[in-house]
Amino acid sequence: MPEGHTIHRLAQDYAAAFAGTAVRATSPQGKFSDAAALLDGTELTGTDAHGKHLFLGFGASWVHIHLGLFGKVALGAAPAPPPTDTVRLRLVNDTAYVDLRGPTTCALITDPEKRAIHDRLGPDPLRPQGDGNDPRTAYARISRSRTTIAALLMDQKIVAGVGNVYRAEVLFRHGIDPYRPGRDITPAEWDAVWRDLVALMREGVRNNRIDTVRPEHTPEAMGRPPRVDDHGGEVYVYRRADQPCHLCGTAVRTADLAARNLFWCPACQRNEPRPRN
């Protein structure tokens, strides 16, 4: 499932290609035909993203998209090729086209319905702080919970947009055992984790990929081979089970947690908060 940086990047890409232009909207698959007919010939007035939810604005209406596990977006230059019958929504203008396939959600909603979606999501590291997007809201829930911090980070009602890669990597970067209960995470640790998520995910939007290793731990700096993986990007522990930790050499471990594979270094990630100075 795409993580939040991908959705925010898509919001930028849709806006760059279609904002301020009248679009031709169709649903070759047929599942969005009625809504596409309403949108056809109207102007894309804005885009928005919150966590893993993408919103395309058409006046007072919004197309709400959640890609889920199988959704894909393909953007290209006009003229558009003939669509396949798997395309849920195609938007076209004089310069570009975009095809949406296989989303979990593709629905035409109103402003109040959009607001309701925002209200049920936690703060998003990629949205401006304020107006209900406050990391202290997330910490208030985390600090009262006996649930593991790894599971809490994947709960979109607590933090929106963090997925399996960012969860594993940010916990490694801060030396936090993924099984530590949320209530044992200190305010200082949470502030550091949040700031790091903001920086890492912004970089993910810019580069359209996830890289989480610090400059001193890149393949060039360490003299090690670059990572070879379909996911791409340089990481510390994600999908590196049984391989040596880049920092200490201990074998990276994996386990199932919150219905996803968790990855961590048992030597570098502690179950106790850092000592206070």
Image: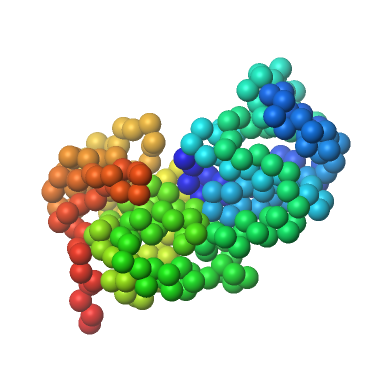
Q: Is 97 on the left-hand or right-hand side of 277?
A: right
Would you place residue 256 above or below residue 154 in this image?
above
Q: Nearer the viewer, residue 42 or 182?
A: 182
Residue 174 in view of the camera: no
Q: Is 43 on the left-hand or right-hand side of 241?
A: right
The quadrant where residue 102 appears: top right
Residue found farthest to the right: 41
Would you place residue 68 above or below residue 213 in this image?
above
Number of numbered discs: 0
Q: Quadrant of the C terminus?
A: bottom left
Q: Is 200 on the left-hand or right-hand side of 205?
A: left
Residue found farthest to the bottom: 277
Q: Is 230 on the left-hand or right-hand side of 122?
A: left
Q: Nearer the viewer, residue 193 or 262?
A: 262
Q: Residue at x 49, y 71 (%)?
A: 137
Residue 193 in view of the camera: yes
Would you place residue 211 above or below residue 274 in this image?
above
Q: Residue at x 37, y 65 (%)?
A: 193
Q: Position of residue 169 (x, y in %)?
A: 33, 52
Q: Where is residue 145 in the image (x, y as percent from the top left)?
A: 35, 68
Q: Residue at x 52, y 62 (%)?
A: 122
Would you place residue 214 above or below residue 7 in this image?
below
Q: Which of 215 and 242 is in front in this view?
A: 242
Q: Position of residue 6 (x, y in %)?
A: 53, 44
Q: Residue at x 52, y 39 (%)?
A: 68
Q: Which of 215 and 175 is in front in this view?
A: 175
Q: How is the structure coloured here?
A: rainbow
Q: Position of residue 151 (x, y in %)?
A: 35, 55
The quadrant where residue 100 appears: top right
